[in-house]
Image: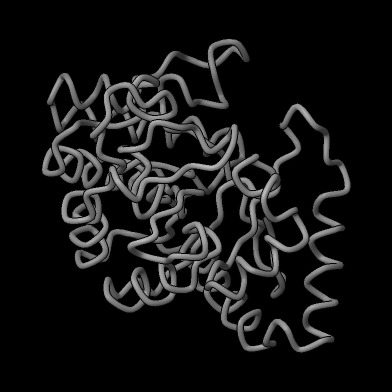
Amino acid sequence: AGGGGGGPLLIAVDAEGGTVMRLSPRAGFSPTLGHGELGELGDLALTELEARRIGTMLREAGINWNLAPVVDIALNPFNTVVGEAGRAFSADAERVTTHARVYLRGMRAAGLLTTLKHFPGHGSSWADSHLGFVDVTDTAIPALELRPYRELIAEGLVESVMPAHVFNRHLDPDSPATLSQRTITYLLRGALGFEGVVVSDDLLMRAIRDHYGLEQAAVLALRAGVDVLLISDNTPVRETTGADRALAAILEALAKGTLQTSAVESALARIERLRARLGGF
């Protein structure tokens, strides 16, 4: 992802450690510990050192933005996308917060930008948003799941946040978090005071693609307060023209007035502030 302004490109990757590690041993990189393993070991110094080691690997590969850590609370141990995959530090909100805090510090020490995900929480779900619609209305526990965001944002440690493709009618009766102004603008930015970048999860995941289509989702996400649209061509159905289609839809919405220019300008300003941090570690 780039943006205007002529500064360095933002090169992002999923590098949580463990099962979600794009620079994996299959590609010749050293094995890494996942969040679940680190949380189980309970050694905060080890978590910080492992984050710093992963961050160093990324920097040496030319990557400067890690789409991690996961701060989902493993409320449902049978959740295939978070709990069973070992992507959550713990089922305990305090332990998740303390490990995420030192993980962020380790990444920052290596010069990496970071992302908390998946807001406002994917850990209670029974379904996987890669595969389809996910409703957490009856399983979410906001008092626990928002704790890492509330504390780490207040401490000034959060540079970007990734919303989840999950639906909770108590937060928004109409839209999943990625496309929800109530969730992103009012809850994340308003109630929690987050002023940084919001980066979507992949808009080609079936939870979004099957219900909205890429073009509509791109416009709705920007209207909701998302700044960076993630469009990944690694899905079973190849979408090699996805970025071009999304851009065309955004330009059309701007021309028609269904998307305000101010929304795009605000997003670009936040992206530039994020990019400026690259030299400030």
- Above or below, comparing residue 276 to residue 93 in the picture: below
Task: Say above or below: 276 vs 34.
Answer: below
The residue shown at (27%, 71%) is 192
Residue beneath the point at 43% across and 59% down: 160
- Residue 225 x, y percent position in the rendering: 52, 73
Q: Position of residue 39 (x, y in %)?
A: 20, 27
Q: Is residue 84 left or right of residue 162?
A: left
Residue 239 sits in which quadrant?
top right
The image position of residue 223, as x and y in percent, is 60, 75
Residue 228 as seen in the image, left or right of residue 253: left
Q: Quadrant of the C terminus?
A: bottom left
Q: Residue 274 or 248: which is nearer the viewer?
A: 248
Q: Is residue 158 above or below residue 93?
A: below
Q: Is residue 126 left or right of residue 156?
A: right
Q: How many numbered discs?
A: 0
- Foreground residue, 88 or 174? 174
Residue 275 picture quarter: bottom right
Which residue occupies 56% across, 55% down?
A: 200
Q: Residue at x 52, y 74 (%)?
A: 270
Near-viewer residue (89 or 126)? 126
**Which color scheme is applied?**
one colour
Please determine whether, in this image, residue 124 is positioned above or below residue 39.
Answer: below
Q: Position of residue 16 (x, y in %)?
A: 42, 32
Q: Quadrant of the N terminus?
A: bottom right
